[in-house]
Amino acid sequence: RRGAARVPDPAAQAGAAPPTHQQERHQVVKKYLQKVKSPPEEDCTICMEPLGGPSGYKGPGVGPVSKAESVGRLTQCGHQYHFQCLVAMYNNGNKDGSLQCPTCKTIYGVKTGNQPAGKMEYHVIPHSLPGHPDCKSIRIIYNIPPGIQGPEHPNPGKPFTARGFPRHCYLPDSEKGRKVLRLLLVAWDRRLIFSVGTSSTTGESDTVIWNEVHHKTEFGSNLTGHGFPDPGHLDNVLEELRAQGITEEDALVEK
Ligand SMILES: [Zn+2]
Ligand SMILES: [Zn+2]
């Protein structure tokens, strides 16, 4: 059972799902997998048990539909896991129809987050950012009010705080800056800009926090390190968005 603790019990968070939900979730995971008849002599990196033996996951929500010995290969990246381990991982996430390979982070389907409800607005301001003297600037305004955590958050039913809103962020109004803006709009729709968790700066828990995509919150100066100039910033943000599964193609489709 050494690996069982690595996969948190989904029933403790969401209540035990009826069998129909279990079957749907198995179907979601199944469509990204090819069945492996003779597994390699490697450990499953989710449960740390050999792929040649049964899944080490012992919690509820995976049993009735598949055998503990079933092993699958993710279709794009080729990484292999116990089928039940992947289902347990899926059950423990947002259950949004997407799956992310825990080894190489390849995203299957469309990844969404747990950003609370709020508003994203932007407009062009007639001033240049340090390092971008040839163009105006884009100001993004995020506003998220405090509220009650939903089932997708760390402590469902408990309130969360929202500090420092509205939060203002800046991009150069250049071709690349506008591209970043388009992708940020997609990220907002997919609830990936903010999350609910523990602030790394204040240590406060159950509060709205930034989620993996860096923003510049200072305009004319760079006292906090979150300002301009920063020549690599736009490329870094594009890379962070790509890691969330968002590319230029997504912006064109959703426009
Ligand atoms: Zn496993
Ligand atoms: Zn992979």
Image (cartoon, grey):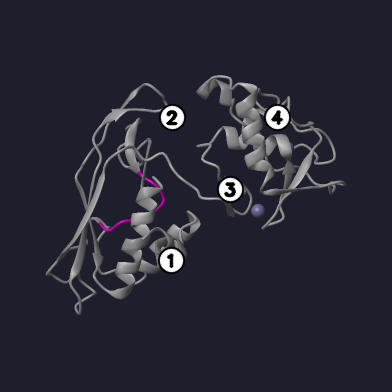
**Distance between the Cα atoms at labels 2 and 4?**
21 Å
125 or 209: nearer the viewer: 125
Q: Which residues are magenta?
A: 210-216
What type of secondary structure mainly makes up the magenta span?
A: loop
**Disc 4 residue type (three-letter):** Tyr
Q: Earlier in the sequence, mark 1 or mark 4?
A: 4
Q: Which residue is mark 2?
A: 154
Say which residue appears at 37% left-offset and 35% top-offset: 198
Q: Earlier in the sequence, mark 1 or mark 3?
A: 3
- Mark linked to residue 210: none
55 or 112: nearer the viewer: 112
Residue 113: give x, y in percent of width and height: 44, 43
Residue 40 in sight: yes
Q: Secondary structure at mark 1?
A: helix
Say which residue appears at 41% left-offset and 24% top-offset: 156
**Disc 1 residue type (three-letter):** Glu
**Disc 2 residue type (three-letter):** Pro
- Mark linked to residue 248: 1
39 or 248: nearer the viewer: 248
